[in-house]
Amino acid sequence: MAVYLDYNSTTPLAPEVVSCISDSLQHHWANPSSDSEMGRIARRTLDTARERVAHMIHADCAQDIIFTSGGTESNNMAILSAVEWGRQHVSKPHVIMSNVEHVATSKPVKYLASKGIIDYTEVAVNQDGRLEVPDVIRQVRPETVLITLMLANNETGVIFPIKHITGRLKSINKERKHPVWVHTDAAQAIGKMEVNVQELGVDYLSIVGHKFYGPRIGALYIRKVLSERVATPVVRGGGQEGGLRPGTENTPMIAGLGVAALLVSDNLHTYTSHMEYVRDYFRTQLKEKTNCVVNCDRFTQLPNTLSVGWPDCSLSGHELL
């Protein structure tokens, strides 16, 4: 029997999510921007989903959530928003990211740099895959407008010290003419650890449904104080999603995302406890029975992720499995 070990890539849809999407396809198909009775029903479906996603990450209000096509769009919107705002304050905005960011973050940044719009700095992680706070803070310049970092790495499971970085930035921003905004891609973290935007202190946070048993759409959290002046749509069109994500909303998938968010809120502790046990058992068995090297300290990792290697092994990962 095949064993699926690629959950950091994509999770299956939870049965509750499948049921919700199916029901919404049949009953909530009207345009949520319409004032018809069916349109109002669809709009309430969106409102419920938005509230559930906001609750999952402890956002101040549901209006802080903008639904998108997925994590890539969310990351692009956050980066573009900060850069466009920054161009009003400095001639060439500067962006900081790590050297292990997902291409959904690194490629937009490098594209803007290739066009001469921004400068950027990549901060290297250490040999354990961890990002050190002083290494990030040292790269802040007068022209810096954005720090964009993943919350947890998709390959190693290492959790980045986002709240410590934003904590250091609070005092730095008080002395600056313009603040440094912080965006985190929480694709790998949501559903596997507590994600609280208040504790993290971030301005933008990307949400990816198919990483936590939801559909393949996403959302972007934008701290309310930024939404009117530091938010730029990737595409232009209608007034949906506060004018930041034009186009008729995909009600069934958004409803499914809301249910997936609800499942995270209700079951996170049970899931993380179970996965920590499974991960630690697997880790112990591998170390006892093979000559594997554990790449990262388990106390800084996601509960579902283990990064190991075998010295002098020529086999591919697929062959090892």
Image (cartoon, helix red, strand yellow):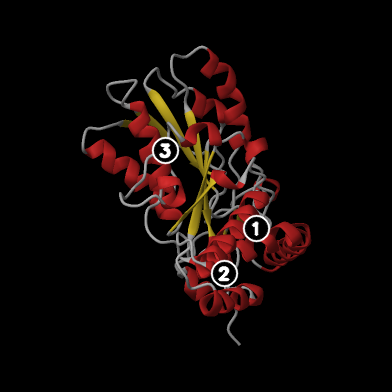
CA gap, disc 1 to disc 2? 11 Å
- Number of other residues with Cα within 10 Å of mark 3, as a class: few under 14, some 14 to 19, many 20 or more: many
Residue 23 drawn at (x, y percent):
58, 78
Badge number at residue 310: none
Q: Is residue 120 visible?
A: no
Q: Amino acid at mark 1?
A: Gly
Q: Is 284 situated left or right of 39 in this image?
A: right
Q: Residue at x 70, y 66 (%)?
A: 282
Q: Which residue is mark 2?
A: 11
Residue lying farthest to the front in this orientation: 36
Q: How many marks?
A: 3
Contact between labelled residues 2 and 1, with CB atoms less than 8 Å apart: yes
Q: Secondary structure at mark 1?
A: loop
- Residue 122 vs residue 264, the one in the foreground: 264
Badge number at residue 231: 3
Badge number at residue 191: 1
Contact between labelled residues 3 and 1, with CB atoms less than 8 Å apart: no
Residue 238 drawn at (x, y percent):
35, 52
Q: Is residue 51 above or below residue 109?
A: below
